[in-house]
Image (cartoon, rainbow, N blue to C red):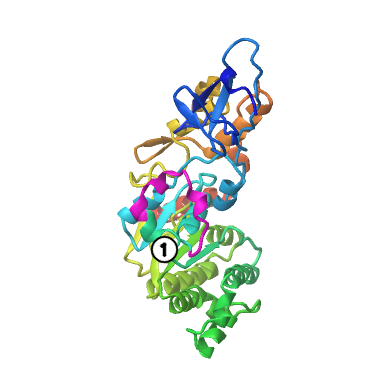
């Protein structure tokens, strides 16, 4: 127990200044706020009078490189709440949604958040206190109600097409292993179970790979009696790598066949969300997908859900007591506009804040440019310029 009468308790309902989880064994009242035992507060404490001792509370950790939503919430990392993406996604319904945003703008974390929200038997505590939790009816209808398939293609980087295929097979193997309970399902036939076993094989045939997401969707719907949500993160990475290394046409054909099976001819699909950095031409891999809704940085819809808004940045700086650095952070990292919203690069902001917590005199720098290569973009531009020049010469 500590002498609460020596402190001013400032409760932060919207923006947290310092997160402190305190179990009090007293019943008192401070500034009109009742304090009871085992009550959890987000607060900071200041001495009320000179001579009052100060209690130190730990701040939330900065989520540098954390892309798993459940881990971020469970291990008390600072979270910029983007959960209303869920409501907007459901309110502005599209069966297939493609979000294109720059790298390091929270695409994977948002996809992980969607998985955590919709997946059957998910941990609802992940969303305690988030904005979406206030949408009670929506949560009752959708939270934890669907089988979710979630794959990321960001790790497919190989020197040859054959090795890239092997990597894609490993990704499908890994996701299929999450659903091994299907082998014991009384709703699936032996033929169904054999089809599922084919998704676990490390030497899976390419034809099976192309239909793997559709097969898994059908089996999950048959077992659960509920259509499936499909999440595909970084869909364009294999194509970018293939373009750089000379097997683009082969990889384009593989991805097109995979997507046609998963998205076009999949009656077990509830809806799908894809993310990537670039929009690959519809004619190359999205042939026939007339219901694909492409949401780029130019679109007003969903403009605030990828990257940090100005208010997000101000809240972060206030929380970590770094508000005096707002002007320099705005000058360095507020260089984007998505739809109608000015957006900061989260990777830069978080890394710079981490530096400032150690050294308040640290100078801003370009953290984002060192995260990956822009070689593919350069080559796409060069190839386009070359094609235009050749057309001019022919004409």
Please state which of residues 145 and 48 is positioned toward the viewer in this rendering.
Answer: 48
Please state which of residues 238 and 248 is positioned toward the viewer in this rendering.
Answer: 238
Q: Total of numbered circles in the picture?
A: 1
Quarter containing the N terminus? top right
Residue lying furthest top:
50
Q: Residue at x 56, y 52 (%)?
A: 70
- Residue 382 seen in render: no
Q: Position of residue 201 (x, y in %)?
A: 63, 79
Picture quadrant where residue 263 is located: bottom left
Q: Position of residue 97 (x, y in %)?
A: 39, 58
> How many neighbours does mark 1 have within 10 angstroms: few (below 14), some (14-19), or many (20 or more)?
many
Q: Position of residue 222 (x, y in %)?
A: 44, 79
Q: Is residue 87 left or right of residue 153?
A: left
In the image, residue 371 above or below residue 237: above
Quarter containing the C terminus? bottom left
Q: Position of residue 10 (x, y in %)?
A: 50, 25
Extent of the magenta region: 120-138
Give SS at disc 1: strand
In the image, residue 272 above or below residue 190: above
Picture quadrant where residue 284 is located: bottom left
Please state which of residues 1 and 177 is positioned toward the viewer in this rendering.
Answer: 1
Residue highlighted by disc 1: 272
- Residue 59 seen in render: yes
Q: Residue at x 48, y 35 (%)?
A: 344
């Amino acid at each position: 127990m500590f002498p609460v009468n020596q402190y001013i308790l400032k409760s932060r309902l919207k923006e947290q200044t310092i997160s402190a989880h305190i179990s009090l064994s007293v019943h008192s009242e401070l500034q009109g706020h009742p304090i009871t035992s085992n009550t959890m507060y987000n607060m900071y404490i200041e001495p009320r009078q000179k001579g009052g001792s100060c209690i130190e509370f730990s701040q939330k950790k900065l989520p540098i490189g954390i892309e798993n939503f459940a881990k971020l919430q469970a291990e008390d990392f600072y979270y910029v709440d983007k959960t209303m993406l869920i409501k907007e996604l459901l309110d502005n319904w599209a069966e297939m949604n493609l979000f294109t945003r720059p790298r390091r703008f929270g695409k994977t974390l948002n996809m992980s958040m969607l998985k955590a929200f919709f997946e059957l038997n998910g941990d609802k505590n992940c969303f305690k206190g988030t904005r979406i939790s206030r949408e009670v009816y929506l949560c009752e209808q959708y939270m934890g109600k669907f089988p979710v398939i979630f794959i990321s293609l960001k790790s497919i980087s190989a020197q040859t097409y054959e090795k890239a295929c092997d990597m894609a097979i490993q990704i499908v193997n890994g996701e299929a292993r999450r659903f091994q309970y299907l082998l014991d399902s009384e709703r699936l036939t032996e033929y169904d179970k054999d089809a599922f076993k084919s998704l676990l094989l490390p030497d899976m045939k390419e034809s099976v790979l192309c239909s793997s997401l559709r097969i898994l969707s059908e089996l999950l719907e048959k077992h659960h009696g509920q259509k499936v949500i499909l999440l595909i993160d970084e869909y364009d990475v294999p194509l970018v790598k293939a373009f750089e290394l000379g097997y683009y046409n082969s990889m384009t054909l593989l991805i097109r066949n995979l997507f046609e099976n998963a998205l076009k001819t999949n009656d077990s699909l509830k809806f799908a969300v894809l993310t990537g950095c670039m929009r690959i031409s519809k004619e190359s891999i999205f042939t026939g997908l007339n219901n694909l809704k492409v949401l780029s940085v130019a679109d007003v819809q969903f403009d605030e859900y990828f990257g940090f808004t100005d208010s997000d940045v101000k809240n972060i700086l206030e929380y970590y007591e770094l508000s005096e650095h707002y002007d320099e952070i705005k000058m360095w990292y507020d260089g984007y506009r998505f739809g109608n919203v000015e957006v900061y690069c989260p990777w830069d902001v978080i890394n710079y804040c981490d530096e400032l917590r150690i050294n308040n005199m640290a100078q801003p720098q370009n953290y984002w440019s060192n995260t990956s290569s822009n070689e593919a973009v350069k080559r796409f531009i060069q190839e386009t310029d070359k094609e235009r020049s050749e057309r001019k010469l022919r004409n």
